[in-house]
Each structure stands twice: as C-alpha cells, then as structure tokens.
Amino acid sequence: MRKPLPLFVFALGLFSHPVLKAQDAPVFSQFFANPFQFNPSYTAHNGFVEANIFYRKQWLGIENAPTVGAFNIQAPVGRNVSLGFSGYSNKTVLLTTNAALGTFAYRINLGAYHHLDFGLSGGISFNNFDLVAVANLNDPALANVVQKSQFLNGQFGSSYQLKNFSIGFALLKLLDSKPNSLETFDKVKFNPFKNRFASLSYNYTVQEFQITPTILFRAIDTQAIQSQLEGMVVVTYKKAIWVGTSFRQGYGLTGFIGMALSSFRAGYAYEHPTSSISKAANASHEIYLGARLGRRDRNEEYLNERKSMDSLARLARGENALKQHKADSLREVALGERKGVNAKDSLLVPVVPGTVANPQEEIKQPVKEKPLVEKEPEEGKMEGYYVVFGAYQKSENAIKQMESLKKAGLAPLMIYNAERDYYYVYTFRSSNKEIALAELRKVLSEKPFSGAWLFNPKIE
C-alpha cells in the first residue's frame, strides 16, 4: 500500500521550481546535446537522422520527487524540410503528464553555415492525477480536480545561425487550458506567450578544443511573470569528450560530462541547488543518450552542392576572363602588325627552363615536388606578361599540351595560379609588355602555335 502524501509535498513539487509545472514544457539541463528538445526549429539541426533520450531525476533522496523522461527522433527529408517526433512523461508528485508531438521544420539556406530555421509542433497531452496517494480527499483544494484528462499541445520556434553564432526563440505552449478543473478543462484558447524560451551561443575553436558559451532564458506567465536566466560554458575536445558547467538563476550550479563514440553520444548532468530550495531538496541527476541513424548528412550535401556551384561560377568567370585576355592580346598583335612590326623583329626566342632570356628576365627552375610546375612568386601571385598556350583546371590536361609543344620544338613551362584555380602552359614571361608582345608575334607567325595569347594576371 502506498504511503499517502500530504498536500504540502504536492505543492512543493508543483510550485517550488518556476519551470517544473507539469502542464508546461519540462526542463532539461543539457541544451547543447539536443536543442530540438527545447526549440522545434532545431529539428535535424545536425543535418542527419538522429534519436535522443533524456531522463531526469529531481531532488534525489526525496520520496516521490519529480522525474521526467523524454524521447525524440528527427530527420531531414529534403534540402530544406525536416520532420520530428517527440514525447515526454513528466511526473510531479501526484500529477503525471504524458505528451506526444509531431514537428515540421523548414530551413532557409543563406549560405555555408548560414541559415534561418522555423519549426512548428502539435500534439496531445494526457494528465493523470493520483488521488489515491492523497491523505485527505475531502480537502477543499481537491474539490474540482479531474483525475484523468487530455488537452491539445502546440509549440513554435525559430533560430538563426551564422557560422559559429546561433540564436533561437521558442514559444513552448501555444494553447492554454486547465485540464484539472471541472469547469474549464474542455476550454482551450490561444495563448502563445505564456511559456517562452530563448538561447544564444557562440563556438570558439582553439586548436583541438571547442569552447561554447551559452545563455538561456525561460519565462512563464501565470498570475505573475516568472523568468529565469542560465549561463553555461561547455568545452569539447576533438568533438569526442565534453565537460562544462552552468549556473541557473534562483536554483544553483550544474556540471556536465559526456563523450561521443562513433555514432553514439552519452552525457550526464549533476545539479546542486544553492538557493533557498536547497533546504528542502537534494541534488538532481540527468542522463542523456543520443545516436546518429543513417549516413545521409544534409549539411554536407548542401556544402558540396554549394562548392560545386561556386566552382562552376568561378570556371565561367575564368573562361570569360581568358577569352577577354586572348581577344585583347590578339588585338594588340594586329595593331602592331598594322604599324609595321614584323615577327622577325622579335628580340627574344622561346626560353629553355633554367636559361636567361635577358639579364633582367630570369625563368626559375620547376618545383622539385611538382615537376614541370614553376614556383610562384613569393607573394603567391603570377606576375608580368606570359605567352600562354592554354589554361586548364586539371594539371594532367596542361601536361598533355606541354608534351605536344615539346615535340614541336618548344620548351614550355607550367604554373598554377591559386587565385584563379588554373594551370597555365606558357613559353615566355617578361615584366615588359612590349617584349612579351614581340615574342607573341613570333609565336603566332608559326601556324602550329596560332592558339597562343598574351596573359597578364593583374588584368581582370
């Protein structure tokens, strides 16, 4: 036979902590492990399918102290859409609330690690009031209590991430109802701002450590607004081991520890009340388990797609620039011919690697670790004017042309320009434009080399 509980114990469990009322969203300490449990917009925030479990035991050592367990599964189902399902069971002395919610979330991608997310959850909750455990059923406070009831539940959240910065805001109780009252349990009204939650965090990376300071805000508007701030710092080593601490206003300190092993994560939180509640309550414990399900990673897919699009755009810009360079240099050659400059008047001949075309114009030896590739200038950019025969994004294509030019009796060189992401095959370089043009006229006079042009990397 269960031991009857006095009403003051029930009151302690229900009202001693401003965010533990059974009909409101339950509170967990490990926000960083699974923010979806706190804000529906974070559905599949990590980019892959995952499942998470929380179990929290409040005030260990006190009989029938509050306990809460939660489960969720979340999955990206498209480029921008995510779906989730969550449920929790919150037992606060005499009142047990069970809830099940489905979540729809949408992401607006603004760039790499830059997005705006929205999430909407809806479901149903069930209350069960344990009248059997009450010592005095004739107490007037229990006159209008309904033993079993249900009510609609809804949540809304939004979040914004820009690289390492993240901010979120959630309304965790869109619908207001009083299911434990005979008079009002069937009346539901829209009251979105009753239960509010906000988060602000930033990730710092120092070598193999990731440091994440976070600020959390909770507020419940009952007869009077009850708000609470929490400051948190978590340090993660190699994305595998984390430790941290937080201080919750009006409550006390919390310590965290956890680890990730392959696709599984596990964490533990220990709460020690330091406020006036410590006189009536002991420490609280919380366990977290998480697992990645499947191999698909939406974030990685988006980044790869973005890189591909950027590469194509860069290639298009590069091709247009090359066409313009070629057209301009050929126009200058034609202009010189109209002025009577003959190819035979060229001052220079194709340069063999390692030789000096002019005492002031030296071509450096190819880089040893990359045969046939000339070392770039110290500032990392190509300089001067080049008599170019081809520009390629793949080095193997450039090498093929070099072999062809060697068979034709030339001594080509190749240089990679990181800024433009091209390999250039050329036979001559000079800081003097007129000298380079003279060499280009000589090359163009020979039919096999009619595709050459003058290239200056400083010209966009």
Image (cartoon, helix red, strand yellow):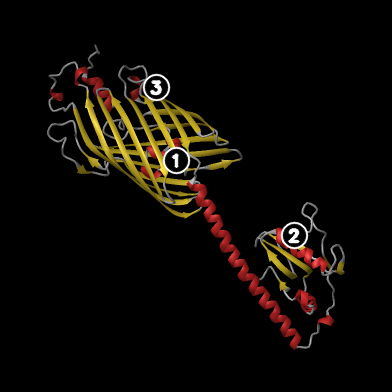
Is any part of residue 380 visible from this angle? no
**Mark 2 or mark 3, which has the lower sequence index?**
3
Where does residue 240 sit, x and y in percent of width and height?
55, 33
Mark linked to residue 426: none
Q: Residues within 10 Å of mark 2 (few under 14, many from 20)?
A: some
Residue depicted at 73% across the width and 66% down the height = 383
Mark linked to residue 283: 3
Q: Residues within 10 Å of mark 3 (few under 14, many from 20)?
A: some
Disc 2 element? loop
Residue depicted at 39% across the width and 22% down the height = 283
Residue type indicated by callout 3: Ala
Q: CA distance from mark 1 to mark 3?
A: 33 Å
Residue depicted at 33% across the width and 17% down the height = 62
Residue holding disc 1: 49
Q: Residues within 10 Å of mark 1 (few under 14, many from 20)?
A: many
- Mark in the foreground, 1 or 3: 1
Residue holding disc 2: 376
Residue depicted at 48% across the width and 39% down the height = 294
Residue type indicated by callout 1: Val
Residue type indicated by callout 2: Glu
Disc 3 element? loop
